[in-house]
Image: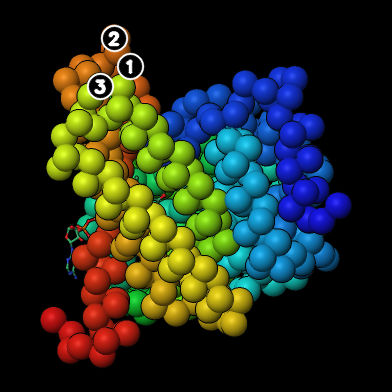
Amino acid sequence: MNFREEVRAWLEANLTGEFAGARGLGGPGREHEGHELRVAWERRLGAAGWTCLGWPEEYGGRDASLSDQVAFHEEYARANAPARVGHIGEGLIGPTILEYGTEEQKRRFLPPIRSGEELWCQGYSEPEAGSDLAGVQTRAVLQGGEWVVTGQKVWTSLAHVADWCFVLARTEPGSERHRGLSYLLVPMRQPGVEVRPIMQLTGTGEFNEVFFDGARTAAANVLGASGEGWRVAMATLGYERGASTLGQQIGFRRELQTVIDTARRTGAADDPVLRDRLVRAWLELEIMRFNALRTMTSLSAGEPGPEVSIAKLYWSEWHRRLGELAQAAQGREGLVARGEPYDLNDLQRLYLFSRADTIYAGSSEIQRNIIAERTLGLPKG
Ligand SMILES: Cc1cc2nc3c(=O)[nH]c(=O)nc-3n(C[C@H](O)[C@H](O)[C@H](O)COP(=O)(O)OP(=O)(O)OC[C@H]3O[C@@H](n4cnc5c(N)ncnc54)[C@H](O)[C@@H]3O)c2cc1C
């Protein structure tokens, strides 16, 4: 049995019993769905060695090649397995700890990410620091062998279920911009941390305001050198979307098919203009796939290049347009919620949540700036 067949067989055998109903649950705009069940699923995956495939074996991974990781994500999406609750741990902080962590930090933090025992959230954005992340004002001081953290983060996805947060904080008083920041690992379940959910357009609340008021973490829980957090923070951003991209596109294909089926059912597909938009969406998804393969090639050759920004810009703009198409395909049905208080169907949720795609993980404007300045060499401003 080759690797892909092994993945497929395992998923088929395990998405049964209590997990049979977990198929399709979760994901952007739907993180509230079956959370406890998905945590149990994460642990089942971890116990069987199907998390963190690319990590080195000595930290519990499989040292899997990029193509095996892609095969895993594709099969995972094809099986319509539940959206992962541990993706911030596996995809963002895990690789950062592997790159910048001390041996003690690796031994402490990686195993519970791999096993699904500890969930993470990302504490970067603040009310006055989003695209301009160097404006971070949350501060931390060393007191009695601990960092004491004070400040506010915002838009913190999944903070309400997270055990730990990686926090970008100013640790050198009077420092400005990129200097004097540190990358701290802060436990969430303590008196100095308050999490307030923010209601989204979809009627659900999966991101939050997080208030640190004298929150504490051990002096050793700084990743990279103290005051050098900017470099570490940028490394984390570089990990957003790697091998999982091709799996994501299988989800997109499923959504597009639902939009097409809906347009046929409602008669919206009789409109030649709408049909043209559907064909265009299909073609662009094919282009996305070829571009993703190109990105994979450059990732396997080493450092991610500008392809990562191009890919983010392309998929997020495409997905937002798909949300608009989903509404057009539904016609009048799309304008009314199914029930009280705010019971959306999948296409309405797709439309509303995909508005966020061009904002998080670097907005479209920021991606265009990166492409312009770093790839095309255009002057700043
Ligand atoms: C669903 C979702 C989940 C998120 N999850 C997290 C999370 O888990 N952790 C976290 O830390 N953050 C998270 N964020 C926050 C996200 O990273 C920020 O929203 C994003 O970086 C933009 O910052 P901002 O909202 O402060 O907008 P601003 O930076 O204030 O930008 C406002 C507008 O101005 C534009 N703009 C800003 N600067 C420039 C420029 N130099 N050139 C051209 N245009 C510019 C932007 O593109 C945008 O359209 C999440 C956001 C969303 C929507």
Q: In which quarter of the image is ligand 1?
A: bottom left
Q: Quadrant of the C terminus?
A: bottom left
The residue tagged 1 is 343
* Residue type of the residue flagged with mark 2: Glu
Say which amino acid is labelled 1: Asp
Name the one closer to the observer, 86 or 126.
Answer: 86
Q: Quick check: is the Cβ at mark 1 less than 8 Å away from ligand 1?
A: no
Percent of width and height locating residue 125 = 33, 56
For the point 78% across and 40% down, the residue is 10
Q: Mark 3 — residue?
A: 266
Residue nearest the viewer, comparing 209 with 5: 5
Residue sitting at x 73%, y 38%: 11
- Name the mark on residue 340: 2
Q: Nearer the viewer, residue 184 or 15?
A: 15
Nearer the camera: disc 1 or disc 3? 3
- Asked whether disc 2 touches disc 3, contact meaning CB atoms under 8 Å apart, the reply is no
Which dot, 2 or 3, sits closer to the camera?
3
Q: Quadrant of residue 306?
A: bottom left
